[in-house]
Amino acid sequence: MMMALPPVGLEHYLVLAAILFVCGVLAILLKRNAIGILMGVELILNGANINLVAANHFAYATGDGKPLLTGQIFALFVIVFAAAEAAVALAIFLNYYNNFSTIDVERASNLKG
Amino acid sequence: MNLSPHGLIAAISMGNVLFYAFAAMIACAALVMVISQNIVHTAVGLLFTLLGVTGIYFLLDAEFLAAVQLVIYVGGTLILIIFGVMLTSQSQRSRLGPSLPQVMVALTLGAILLIALVVAIHHVTPTLARSQPAPGEYPMDLLGQALLGDALAPFELISVLLLVAMIGAAYLARGRKRSNENSGSRTP
């Protein structure tokens, strides 16, 4: 019998997204490498995406029987947004590395161009 | 699809097992990302996290989104990040680790945040969740119609955002080097 595992519902997906979100926050707080912080941001965005897609899935076919797609479209936009954000952030980090020859955010006390 | 009840139950429990497998993979990879001090290990953890999220999208019947996640995130953003890691690689002796007070504060904050989120989810989900999982899938043509219909304005806006971000990133990454050359030998 597979009764040991409760059936997977919306709550499971939300808890998984919460774990991902907390891991992202911890990565942002604990990393001193700027690129590690960027990866933490990616974790947070993925957690938000899981929330959106799961909520969309469990709100299927309300009303006239056509499936709702709002959550999926929103998740698509979040993915594009994350790509743009990663490109700009990496450009800033490369610039910073060129100037200070380090990527340690603790030493980024001087932002004068 | 005429699944027998036994087959339906088997399919549902198969989805359960897959969900727990993907969830364990995501959680372990994310924990590796948090704990590891080596930036390359962190990038590998991010890779497995993104792959697990792709599996979660498949379980949620969002096949198109799973493909997009695989192509853009795993194939694009992650490669970009790994290039960033290689371009800013430092000597191995300087491991950038957090101090002990930072670790204590971060762990306390993370525990409080996680407990608060889980309690909030427990309170909220009974009013949101349906009893049965959705039987259908999301037709691709509806997604395309929605992207060019109801969501047309954000769709166009995000393409403009992407263009602006691309130009801005190219300007940021190239401008400094040129001014370095102009200002002579300013050692980095």
Image (tube, helix red, strand yellow):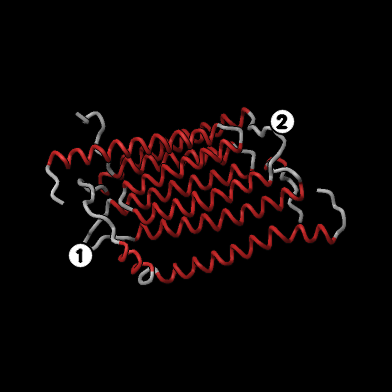
Q: What label sits on residue B93 in the rendered view?
A: 2
Name the residue tied to disc 1.
A64
How far apart are the two marked residues, 1 and 2, measured between alpha carbons? 63 Å
Q: How crowded is mark 2: few (under 14 residues within 10 Å), some or many (20 or more)?
A: few
Q: Which chain carries label 2?
A: B
Q: Which amino acid does label 1 sit on?
A: Asp
Quadrant of residue A73 within the rendered picture: bottom left
Q: Is mark 1 on a helix, strand or loop?
A: loop
Left or right: A8 as drawn, with respect to B149: left
Could you tell me if the residues under marks 1 and 2 are in contact, i.e. CB atoms within 8 Å? no
Q: Mark 1 lies on which chain?
A: A
Residue farthest to the right? B184
As rendered, which of A85 and B76 lies closer to the eye? B76
Q: Where is residue B85 in the image (x, y as percent from the top left)?
A: 63, 44
Q: What residue type is labelled 2?
A: Arg
Are callouts 1 and 2 both on one chain?
Answer: no
Q: Position of residue B55 (x, y in %)?
A: 37, 44
As rendered, which of A99 and B17 lies closer to the eye? B17
